[in-house]
Structure formats: C-alpha cells, structure tokens
Amino acid sequence: MTGLVHVVDDDASFRTAIERRLKKAGYKVAIYPSAQELLDGLPSESELGCILLDVRIPGLSGPELQGRLSELGSTLPIVFLSGYADVQTTVRAIKAGAEDFLTKPVSSEELVDAVERALARHQATRNQKLKLDLVRAQIATLTPREREVFELVIRGKTNKQVANVLGTTERTIKAHRHKVMEKMQVPSLAELVSLAERAGVLADRSGTRQTS
C-alpha cells in the first residue's frame, strides 16, 4: 500500500535516516522538525497517509500534538516513536487512539509493518466517511415533509401513526414513504433505519416526535 508518511522529529539525522528507509520501501515522505510545523501546514486527508511522531520534541510534545490533531478532526493515524520505553506514556497514547508505539532504534521491518497498518486504518476511515457523506447527501435531497416522514418512520411509527402526527391521510404518507425509500436507495425499512443510524439521525434527534 502506497501513501504519504508525515515524520515529526527534532533529530535531523534520524529524520534523514527514516526518510531514506521509508522512500526505499516505496512511500512518499514529508518531514517536520517540530509539531508546530505540522500544525501550520496541516496535512490534507485527500491522500492516504499517516504520521510518525516522536514523543519528546521541543515545544509541543508528541502527545500534545496528538490531542490537538484530534480536536481539529484529523483522522490520520499516528505511530509514536520514542527512545524511552515509558509504559505510562505508551498506554496513554494508545488509549487516545494511537495506531502503534515503537521504541527506537526501530527495525525496517517493524517500521514498515506499523506504517502498513496505519495506512490500512486510514483507508478504512476514509471509506467509511465517503459512505457517510453519501448518506447525508441523500438525506439532503428529501423535501421538508419527506424528512418529517423519514424521521418518524425510522423510529418505528406506522403509516397510520405518522398520518395522525402530521395531520394528513395514510395514503399520502404511503406516497411520501415510497419517495423517501426511492431517494435513499433502500428496499427495506431495516436498511433505512441502518442508514439513519450511520448518519447519526437517530442519535441527533432522539426524543423528537415520539408521541403518536
């Protein structure tokens, strides 16, 4: 799997060595001597990638950069590198979502394995986001009335109950429901509910229009 590896380390000789090893393995590489430099040129996620991040760097530390990137919504997986086997830091980084934690010196095999896992994770995350964006785009095509029908139907309301809530006929609701299924491109109510859950509609609007 090819991708762009962002290396953040204040040790110039280590950056050069790691860049050489990664390029030899077929990856593109971007290097940063500090966490702030990576933040200043926040990597685009349009390209498959990951971050190799030293724990102890001057200024913003590795774990602090991890927290900042998380706040910014970055989904680039992070592989930490450290010259010190610090169990507490390792556990904290992994709990915060780090892909891996490697101790320097790291073998080329170990490095490539960690990068491959990180890139695979980023690929999965991007695929999930593309699917989610598609679902949200489909929801956006619903008319206001279709959206009302959609939100009631996915909460288990029958056509009759939806008609009562919206003050219209069951026949009209059936027509709206058919249009909703058509626009959302699903053949069944179960799949419609699944899409709604994936898009966060049930979580976002739970508690609304619950009376029949």
Image (spheres, rainbow, N blue to C red):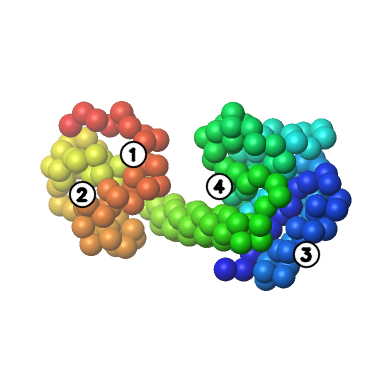
Say if mark 1 contacts mark 3, CB within 8 Å.
no
Residue type, mark 1 in image: Leu
Mark toward the start of the polypeptide (4 vs 2): 4
Q: Provide the secondary structure element on which disc 2 rests.
A: helix
Say if mark 3 contacts mark 4, CB within 8 Å.
no
Q: CA distance from mark 1 to mark 4?
A: 30 Å
Residue type, mark 2 in image: Ile
Mark toward the start of the polypeptide (3 vs 4): 3
Tell me if I can see residue 189 in this picture: yes
Labels 1, 3: front one: 3
Tell me if I can see residue 65 in this picture: no
Q: Which quadrant holds residue 200?
A: top left
Residue type, mark 4 in image: Glu
Q: Provide the secondary structure element on which disc 1 rests.
A: helix
Mark toward the start of the polypeptide (2 vs 1): 2
Report crowding for label 4: few under 14, some 14 to 19, many 20 or more residues within 10 A (C-alpha): many
Q: Is residue 150 left or right of residue 98?
A: left
Mark toward the start of the polypeptide (3 vs 2): 3
Residue occupying the point 85% across, 53% down: 13
Which label was assigned to residue 99?
4
Q: Which quadrant holds residue 187?
A: bottom left
Return the residue at label 3.
20
Return the residue at label 1.
202
Report crowding for label 3: few under 14, some 14 to 19, many 20 or more residues within 10 A (C-alpha): few
Q: CA distance from mark 4 to mark 2?
A: 48 Å
Q: Provide the secondary structure element on which disc 3 rests.
A: helix
Which label was assigned to residue 173?
2
Q: Provide the secondary structure element on which disc 4 rests.
A: loop
